[in-house]
Amino acid sequence: MNSVQSSALAPSSASDSKGLARWAGALSLVQGLLLFVPLTVLGAAINWPESLSDPAEIALPRILEQESGVRLGYVSYLIYSVLFAITMILLVRYAKSRKAMGLGSMITGFAIASTVARCIGIIRWLVPVPVLAELYAATADESERTAISVAFEALNSFGGTIGEALGVSIFAAISIGLFAIAVLKTKAMPAWLGIFGLIAALSILATAVELIGIDASTLIFLGTTVVQLWFLAIGIWLLLRGGRPAAAAVG
């Protein structure tokens, strides 16, 4: 009786796995490519991400001059950040459809925490910072400009710590790292994707050295590149082989 039930459920399970493979694969590809939009738009407008540490007297006038580019770039970065949680959730669902897998709740939890933290960091550039830029441009009084500069530095430090340090460097690294470990333990995907995921997780975790005052500009570029390549690799694999039976797909 149990074997009959298993046979009856198998086609539906296989169909679900194929559907999840398509969705997770497509979103992984989008996730891997979408970061190039804010990199291109914000890079041209305000020399992002190098400009994140610029002082108020440089950052605020430039943000006002490039307001449309700043808004477009950070809105695209916001979409990219929200998509991270959705993509990780779909990857977990796909992996669970192939093999029984633990750590799923932790992976999705840290992915959601990463997205929330990133969004908090990004919102500062869409709402309060443009207001400070307008106030800075509207006054020639040095004491007022000093007060605005202090407010900007505090806001930028707070938002950067939450968005970049916690959201990207720590929470995203933990989510990707746990997923990679789960893949290696369950063989729901090829081992090389799990190993690649661990390398990606460690590469962005390394950027957390900013918290102890070490310049991480090079590490940020390298870490971000490795993570995007991992998403592209996992997306391509899912679309090409993810819908096959587990043994055939991984083998």
Image (spheres, helix red, strand yellow):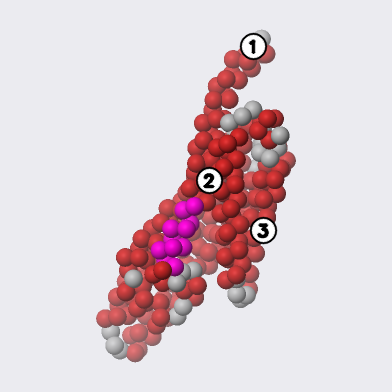
Disc 1: which residue: 4
The amino acid at mark 3 is: Leu
* Residue at point 64%, 55% (across, down): 200
Tell me, yes or no, whether the highlighted magenta stretch contains residue 42: yes
Q: Relative to residue 240, is residue 4 depicted above or below?
A: above
Q: Which residue is mark 2?
A: 28
SS under mark 1? helix
* Span highlighted in magenta in the image: 33-43
Camera-side residue of 251 and 195: 251
Residue furthest to the right in view is 185
Q: Earlier in the sequence, mark 3 or mark 2?
A: 2
Q: Nearer the viewer, mark 2 or mark 1?
A: 2
- The picture places residue 164, in percent across and down from the top left corner, at 53, 64
Disc 2 residue type? Ser
Q: Residue lying furthest front in this view?
A: 240
Res. 47 image quadrant: bottom left
- Residue at disc 2, secondary structure: helix
Q: Are marks 2 and 1 in contact (CB under 8 Å)?
A: no
Residue 81 lies left or right of residue 145; in this view the side is: right
